[in-house]
Image: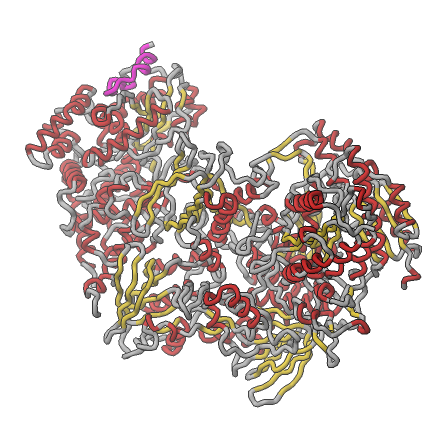
Amino acid sequence: MADEMKMGTYICTGCGIGDRLDASQMEMIATREGKATYAKTHDFLCSQAGVDMIQADIDAGEVSNAVIAACSRRAKNEAFNFQDIAVSRANLREGVIWVRPDTDEARETTQEMADDYIRMACFEAKHMHAPKPSDEQSLNKHLLVVGGGITGMTAALEAAKAGYPATIVEKTGQLGGMAGRLAKKIPTRSPYANPAETEVADLIAEIEANSNVTVCLNSTVAKTEGAPGRFDVEIATESGSTSTIQVGAVIQASGFKPYDANQLPEFAYGKTPDVVTQAELEDLVKAANGDAVKRPSDGKEISEVVFVQCAGQRSDKEGHLSYCSGFCCNASIKQAMYFKDANAGIDTTVIFTDLRTPGSGGEDFYRSGQQKGVVFTKGVVSEVEPGSDGHTVKFKDLILDEDTAIQADLVVLATGMLPNSGVDPYAAEKAAAAEEEEGEEADKGDVVATVDVESILNLDYRQGSDVPQLVHGFTDSHFICFPYETRRTGIYTAGPVRRPMDIAQAREDATGAAMKAIHAVENAGKGRAAHPRSGDLSYPTFRKEGCTQCKRCTVECPFGAINEDEERYPTFNESRCRRCGTCMGACPVRVISFENYSVDTVGAQIKNVDMPDEFDEKPRILVLACENDAYPALDMAGQNHIEYSAFVRVIPVRCLGSVNTIWVTDALNSGYDGVILMGCQKGDDYQCHFVKGSELAHTRMSKIDDTLQQLNLETERVMTYEVAITDVQRAPKLINEMAETIEKIGMSPFKF
Amino acid sequence: MATKEYSFYPGCSSQEGASSSNYLVSVESMCEELDVKLNTIPDWNCCSASIGYCGGGELPRLTLSARNLALSEEHNPGQDVVATCAACWLATRETAERLGEDDDLMAETNQALAEAGLTFKNENKIRHMVEVLIDDFGYEELGKHVKKPLEGIKIAGYVGCQTNRPFGIEGESFENPKYLDKLVETLGAEPVENYEKKVSCCGGALAFSEPEKSQALIKEIIESAYDGGADMIVTPCPVCQMNVEVYQDKINAKYGTKFHIPVTYYSTLMSVAYGRSAKDSALGGQIIRAKQLEDIANK
Amino acid sequence: MSDMNVAMVERYRNNFLKEVEHNVEEGDWVKMCMQCGVCSGSCPLGPYWDHPPQELFMMIRAGKREEVLTSTSMWMCTSCYNCIVRCPRELPITHIMHGLAHYAKRLGLAPKEQPTFKFSQHFWNNLVKKGRVNELKLGLSLYFMNGLVEGIKTSLNMAGIGLGMLKTKRMSPMEMIGGHSVKDTKGFHAMLKKAEEIEAARVEKYGKGS
Amino acid sequence: MTDIVATNQTILVVGGGISGITAALEAAETGKDVVLVEKRPFIGGRITQLYKYFPKLCFPTCGLEINQRRMKANANLSIVTMAEVTDIAGSTGDYTAIIKISPRYVNENCTGCGACADAVEAEFDNEFNYDMDKRKGAYLPYNMAHPQRYVLDPRVIGTADADKAKEACKYGAIDLDMQEETIELKAGAVVWATGWRPYDAGKIQPYGYDRIDNVITSVELERMMDPFGPTGGKLVRPSDGKEAKNVAFIQCAGSRDRNHLRHCSRICCMASLKQSTYIREKYSDDGQVTIYYIDIRAIDRFEDFYKKVQDDPKVKFVKSKVAKIEEDKASGNPVCHGVDTEGYNRYAEAHDLVVLAVGMEPSVDKDNFPVDIVINQDGFIEPDDANGGIFAAGSASDALDVNRAVQHATASALRAIQIVNRVAGTEG
């Protein structure tokens, strides 16, 4: 391959590049130092003529690896979109001329900057190959849906309607889940005035009639192995028999468990059958079968019903849920209507602190409840005192500002939802971290959620049996823009396992998850990456001879993509891989690489800048910038002509997690005076799209101080920052600060 | 333009010897100039304003206005009912709307009206005189009749409550209606821009029962007019006019202020601007004399 | 029911709310309030209300019958309609206040010394008599509504205003003798009587609720 | 631009905000042909004008960068900007859409160098910043605008500025003869993702947005926080540029109100909680926030964020719909009047700045909808079989936050795929 490589360098002189920089010098550098086969200059490279020129070379077999020295890699992508060749972009516009003053004094250092970027691009290109899918990919349009509740049924049906068969695995003996328990649901259509039919029966009928949906009742998932496009799922029935199916992707719709109201003795739950949860009231209504619900304790007529909102929720008390389950306000309105619609003479009072009925339908439903005579009282219930004939609900009326009480035949507790999310692979890790940080103070609300859990998916993954959880046990991704992205590729969670929600939302969520599952199988079938590098064909491979089986890569992969084979070598499961390169950054022996992104593509760039000697007073600063946030921020700094030091050389990286410390030590050894790593925010509100990349980089870099000390270098020479895409002014400032630091502490002694 | 005819509900305070009799005089002059014929509803009764509620329940009060409307339907068929008093307009229009929405109330009302030999069908629109001026004439047309522009007078347009809420004048906001300002401008005078208290309450009927509380409100209304540099205040409401005008001495005594600002009706301004005499414009009805208007009227 | 007063518990039944719905003008809107308080903040006499409208609505829901009906609060309404136009829930608050005041008066629970109570009643009596308001009589009856001595004081106090009105012919001593009137007083009175009967029957029928 | 090939297997996505982008990308990356039509000169929609997202306080452009990269890399997706769908005829699996494309006066040659903007002198109100500042007559709407291509304001056409712009461009990108075009596109299914607009605060008369300088809207505050926004990222008062340290937020400004929007706009509580952190971010302990609310609707995990803000001693919550705002003439301070309903406490609080948490109004007026579709009284599209192959996505369907809008749009992409797969006969 290497000997066939023909490298073409194309230098654009448009947008002022030609006016500010010496193009012929860059051509010379490209061919002489960068070892380009040839270099061409064009005054408008992104024009049709410019693009045609490059394409002609490609068509003629003149170029296999191209350097486009023009604007940023983020600009003019439509134009410079060449298939089947490796392309490196030297950012002469946003990265050089736009960040430098157009003055005589600046000319020399600006030119040096450009020259270096030509060298770097040439050496990057030299080590790149156009990525092609491996032959591991396979298309399997079959989906697995775990859970036969409203979410699972919806997901299976919606997928089937698009031509993707689905198998539902349901633990119990019937479909319907929690929704099947409901008498009616919160209305989902205008005018949002009355409780509506749950449509569970219709869905079940639809599923039975759909030949593309298979249902396994009384079944669980005993084992899931493989990767998107080629999952093998072992389904176990109650009787103990197992069968294995092959699926392309998985939707986990394992739903929720109702909160255990026994933890609410203050509300007399368990002390009298007249105190029930919302779910239990549904049972009572269903059992009454159209007749009036009677007082459970003695079968007497009910004349007063009190709904206690946020029962065991939105509370810091031990055993309570700290979050809001979101659906309960509307559910209480609906349930109050059960009574009001049957007999307007029954008093129904909802005691709430914040009535949460959002959206277009929510407010209408609230109004409809009021219209029907449901009384809403802003208050906090302190205690339910059981009586022989009715019970006393004591509360503080927050509007009238008084402690008072209300009599009730039936008290309904609006208790919350607990996600049925399986075993958190990182529970132990999190607990340890929490203990370290807070001691006793660890979030008590979460304790409830993690007692006695069984695995849902039984993933045969190195990093645990289930999808990682975010907070409170929910499998939320913490991405606002990409809500479905779990940390297990090709496995999507939907419904209340992901976030507390009602039926309408769960059905939307299920449909969305089905879309993502379909998206995953289609892309896995083509060997393409899933989010966030969707479409990327590159994938990691490793040099087995060099591997020490240290397991860093399998442990650090944020997506649990990497397993270990029998010989304890990593297996990358490319369709599980998100192509962030964290494994590459983790590898102490640097054997992991991608076709177009490797220790060499970056390392060669670092090594091939022209390093002035110590007395030139021209320090060199290396910036490794996350391509998603820091690099665009620097681009935009250029767009706005915000200047920064000409001594800096910026290399975009897929994720800070992919930064191998060797790059930093190499840089220092080869005479760089400073190194800056710019990654995304880490921690609870992480913004790293590879979840852990930035955090891992910070951890790794915290250990680099030792190396610096060994080299007798000041620790200030290496800085790791969290930089957001909006840090358009700050990122250049950080660079300039490093330049000042170097001025203060002096040049690196490692210049040869 | 052809003569415009309306069924007219003058209301108690406009009667001879009553508190806003001057309003009616100026309205009549204004209407003459605009070729408007007001056909008074024969034997109209009090609308009970918005203060009769202690003794009068909902149905009796609605019946009062329904009687006027029934009489209007009988004697001035097909004509929009026009009132000059804010309370009259409000009570009457409210009655028409409430009875229009509630068939039971409508039936009960007619049951009561039958005792007086009347039936209410709810056929006609109920309008305030200001609506007639703005919608049926428009500022441009109103401007054409100006013979003596009210030059050099700065006027605060005090809209008050009931001409403004809950119905208000179409296209105007509740918090910052601009029609009086536009009218003032049309007549050649200068409106007070951003008159802050233009829709503040003067206390209404509570000026009688809660004088101190009301006078505190009135004080702010006048103060704000002075702050805006006003020479006088103009209003479309008889209660507003009276409350803001007559208590100025009391307020001065209590707060040590030196209020002495004329409070006129829009019809007064129009009558003067349209060239009518001080008498026709009922300038004699000003307890605090509007000298600038007198000067123009006497020119 | 250990430490909690039985009456207090009883209070929170919806009985009074239902009574208000049936017997008070526009009372069926009370349940629609969402306690935003915009009415209370919008009232020009706001600071003088013991219980502003939104609180009255909550008190009605909480069954505080006596406290509501004996309150002076609704008598503070100036009928400025600020609350109505600002209410996000479309409650005709002004009318409900009038309705509550009237209902309190009907039940004999209204605070009889409340000046607006008196004025409002005088006003009604005055207009009912002849079908039109006699401003002079109304004014004088007002001045003397707190008794003779107070009345003389008030009259003297207000003399300046009266004089101004007289001078500008906006008040006429003639009103004392006859004054304006509808012609068909008989029909007028029969009509009002009928309306009152119908309304009384309606209230009677529901009573205080069950 | 007009040579887009569309068939009855094409999915037409109307609206290039976060919902439209999501639906378009999910479908395109699954192998479908997608045409995305956007009214503005760039895609991204409302989120581009936000400073941060709740509850993570992360930056919208971060996710947008990924989405833009996805778009640049996808050959199945065609984007048409400055275009509006004026009519859709036909039925499920066989629609014809009429699309009106306004002239940009800048063609694909544009390199984004900015020479035209340097040359043009005329300035206009900057709609991107809600008219709080000016922009040039030749402009890039904002830093990350995609496509990264300048726009000539139609108001400069025919003026000397237009010629200056043309002269300044070395790349033949300025085309002053560009005309409005109307094109017809076939589509099997349509995803309607036209999103929302902030409710017109001027209509909320008691709050005096149109009369009091220091009463602003929540969306304007987002722009002020942007270092490239109208105040250069400074949180200052419009009247006098004074630092706005004592800031009030008024919830339900136009929402849950029969005088305005009847529905709850869902996002505004969280938006104000989020914005309360802006004040603290800028002014630390000198910052003081008051939030006037009816109900704080911090649904599900958002409750954590609410708690965090509640724990901040500098943030005060008052259960009250503010009755009115008056301006204190001397200081320029807006004074909020109202009653704290928890225990009946009257207040008249002066603040440096009042922010109206304005509601979400559907972008397309329900009385002038170009498509025959079931719409509820609030103007949102309802899911209904009668809608055939036209599916709402995101806040065209309900008041939704970004997360829920994306979720909804992802679902809508599948619904559209179901239709085109049926047309293609591949639905199995």
Residue B26 lies, in percent from the top left, at 29, 22
Q: According to the image, what is the colour scheme of the structure?
A: secondary structure
Tell me: A69 left or right of D19: right
The stretch drawn in magenta includes residue C208? no
What residue appears at the point 30 percent right and 32 percent down from the top-left corner? B83
Tell me: D178 left or right of B159: right
Find the residue positioned furthest to the left: C148
Q: Is residue D176 above or below residue A329?
A: above
Residue A306 lies, in percent from the top left, at 32, 67
Q: Is residue B46 above or below residue A567?
A: above
Which range is magenta?
B281-298
Quadrant the N terminus of chain A occupies: bottom right
Tell me: D55 left or right of B53: right
**Residue D27 showing in the rendered view:** no
Q: Is residue A488 above or below residue D80?
A: below
Residue A707 lies, in percent from the top left, at 71, 59
Residue D157 lies, in percent from the top left, at 70, 32
Q: Is residue C117 above or below residue A446?
A: above
